[in-house]
């Protein structure tokens, strides 16, 4: 209870001072494996970067043009096909601490799934997953540049 009031109080002080509190990263455990996701905003990105040493798998989600993505469904299976972890990300970065070995990563964004076979050990392994953008949706044209038919 004390911790909750402290968080509320700090948030209120930051908002009163005109600063927005940093968005918290999603953390959890899937089949005993620790993970974290986030990276929306500079404070969250810095927090994720500072915690990299705790994990051995990092996934980064973007459009082909480099725009970061959130709400990516992630599923990890071990070498035997057993589900190890499944979640939806809160930002463009996802990190997990897994036992060394081979895994299948499936990431789904906007109905399009990418699957990769990876191997992790004690060192951080980073994988970039990129999806094609949809013209006019991901980069809508300003009204003055739209042509009337």
Image (cartoon, rainbow, N blue to C red):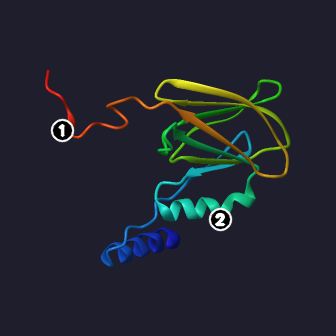
The front one of 143 and 13 is 143
**Whether residue 78 is situated above or below residue 69 in the rendered picture:** above
Residue 136 appears in which quarter of the rendering?
A: top left
Which quadrant: the C terminus?
A: top left
Compared to residue 61, the image places residue 9 above or below, namely: below
Q: Secondary structure at mark 2?
A: helix
Question: Residue 116, percent across and down?
Answer: 70, 29
Q: Residue 128: which numbered mark, if any?
A: none
Label number found at residue 50: 2
Judging from the image, what secondary structure is the residue with disc 1 in? helix
**Of callouts 1 and 2, the N-terminal one:** 2
Residue 8: x, y in percent?
Answer: 41, 70
Q: Nearer the viewer, mark 1 or mark 2?
A: 1
Q: Is residue 15 above or below residue 61?
A: below
**Residue at left 54%, top 43%?**
89
Residue projecting furthest to the left: 148
Return the x and y of residue 52 as percentages of the image width and height: 69, 58
Q: Residues within 10 Å of mark 2 (few under 14, many from 20)?
A: few
Give the residue drawn at x 58%, y 38%.
Answer: 87
Q: Position of residue 2 (x, y in %)?
A: 51, 73
Residue at the spot 74% in from the left edge and 53% down from the top edge: 55
Asked whether, in this view, residue 24 is left or right of residue 144, the answer is right
Q: Relative to the observer, which residue lies in front, 74 or 92?
A: 92
C-alpha span from label 1 to label 2 = 41 Å
**Which residue was labeled with disc 1?**
143
User: Which residue is at 48% across, 24% downward?
Assistant: 111
> In the displayed structure, does residue 62 sit left or right of residue 85?
left
């Amino acid at each position: 209870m004390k911790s909750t009031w402290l968080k509320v109080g700090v948030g209120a002080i930051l908002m009163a001072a005109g600063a927005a509190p940093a968005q918290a990263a999603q953390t959890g455990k899937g089949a005993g494996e620790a993970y974290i996701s986030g990276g929306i905003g500079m404070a969250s990105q810095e927090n994720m970067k500072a915690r990299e040493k705790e994990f051995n798998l990092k996934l980064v989600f973007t459009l082909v043009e480099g725009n970061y993505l959130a709400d990516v469904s992630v599923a990890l299976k071990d070498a035997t096909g057993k589900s190890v972890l499944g979640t939806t990300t809160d930002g463009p970065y996802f990190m997990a601490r897994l036992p060394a070995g081979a895994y299948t990563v499936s990431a789904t964004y906007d109905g399009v799934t990418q699957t990769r076979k990876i191997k992790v050990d004690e060192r951080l392994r980073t994988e970039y997953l990129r999806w094609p953008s949809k013209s006019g949706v991901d980069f809508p044209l300003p009204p003055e540049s739209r042509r009337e038919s």
